[in-house]
Amino acid sequence: MILGTQVTLTERLARMVGAVTMATTSDATRTYINEGVREFSKRAHGIATESFITLAPKFDADTNFAAKFTIGGGALNFGSTDIPLVSSTLRDATPTTLLSHIVSNVNAIGTGSFTISMGWSASNWQFYINLPASVTNFAMVAPTYVGYVDATSLFFGNAISRRGSITITGGFPQDCNLDTSLPAGFLEMDNVFYGTNELSVAPFCNFLRPRATGTPRYYSVNNKEIFLNPVPNKQDFFKIFYSGFPNDLGLDGSSDSVACPLPEEMHMSPVYYAAACLLEESHEFDKSIYYQRKFNDMCTDFKIRDANNNPSMFPGRSNTFPPLVTMSSI
């Protein structure tokens, strides 16, 4: 059933005439139908959904994250200087945002016309540093001051020391890809696959940083974010199967030809819900309660059917055999 048909049926059941609470009656009707879809999905503990996820590197940093830099040659010479890498606290920052802070803070220490630039390799998930040709030596190691957090391995994978290299590539960061946002409407996870492997759920305490990199084996969900362990060092097939509620359809008539996202046999449930809401606005409480009951009945029928399709609700076939009985020869 498409949204336009649901609008018509709802307004016939509610005997609506003229505007209600929005610009037109149908605007209010579509709003209540969307609410009915969400309410049905919540009572049904979510509608089975699947989605592909693309990993996006993210970084957290505080103003005490630092590294000790030594740069020599050309117009610039400074040695063994602790430099905070960010000017303000960053949460779930993109590589570009993080780099803008690091480059600005390092170049501010330099003299003359010397500047460095940094970039991010989307294919290797590594930072790289570009130096002027005049630089004869460059080093980035752990800071000396005990009040600083050593961020060289967090962001660049390891300490860096080079001579005569214009472009320096860091190792794989230990503090990226901590989490990836789950799709809108997510309620509960069912299955997670990365590559050809199905991941096992693990306690959230196992996902504290820094973490190992490699092929993920475990996942955890916290605040609609998914965490992987080990952290993947490359993009791969990443698919989740979960229970959730669908996105709202348009209120301006643009979605009136779109089918209701609920199972086909449940398309009348948001109609009953919306009719009950409209009748309540017009103070026809008896009819509103009647349609609310019909909506509740459909929710109950769906949950019973869903439970009957779940093999865990019933005794399974035993995979063990009874012990052999030894017969007496007497």
Image: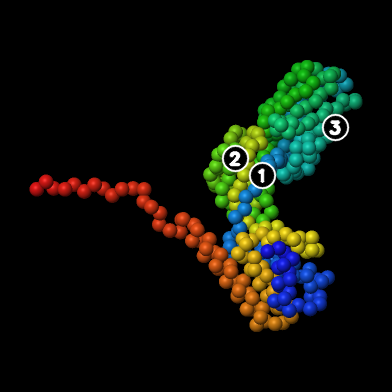
Relative to 297, is 235 on the left or the right? right
> Which residue is rendered at x = 46% and y = 56% of the image?
312
The answer to whether 330 is drawn above or below residue 296 in the figure is above
Q: Nearer the viewer, mark 1 or mark 3?
A: 1
Q: Determine whether 77 is above or below 64 in the image.
A: above
Residue marked by disc 3: 108
Residue located beneath label 2 in the image: 194
Mark in the foreground, 2 or 3 = 2
- Residue 325: image x %, image y %? 21, 48
Q: Which residue is the extreme one toward the left?
A: 330
| Separation (CA) of disc 2 from disc 3 | 42 Å
**Which residue, given by chain and number where applicable, does mark 1 sit on?**
53
Say what amino acid the circle numbered 2 marks: Tyr
Amino acid beneath label 3: Ala
Query: Tag 2 or tag 1, which sits nearer the N-term?
Result: 1
> If the image is split into quadrants, where does the N terminus sit?
bottom right
Residue at 13%, 48% in the rendered image = 328
Q: Earlier in the sequence, mark 2 or mark 3?
A: 3
Q: Residues within 10 Å of mark 2 (few under 14, many from 20)?
A: many
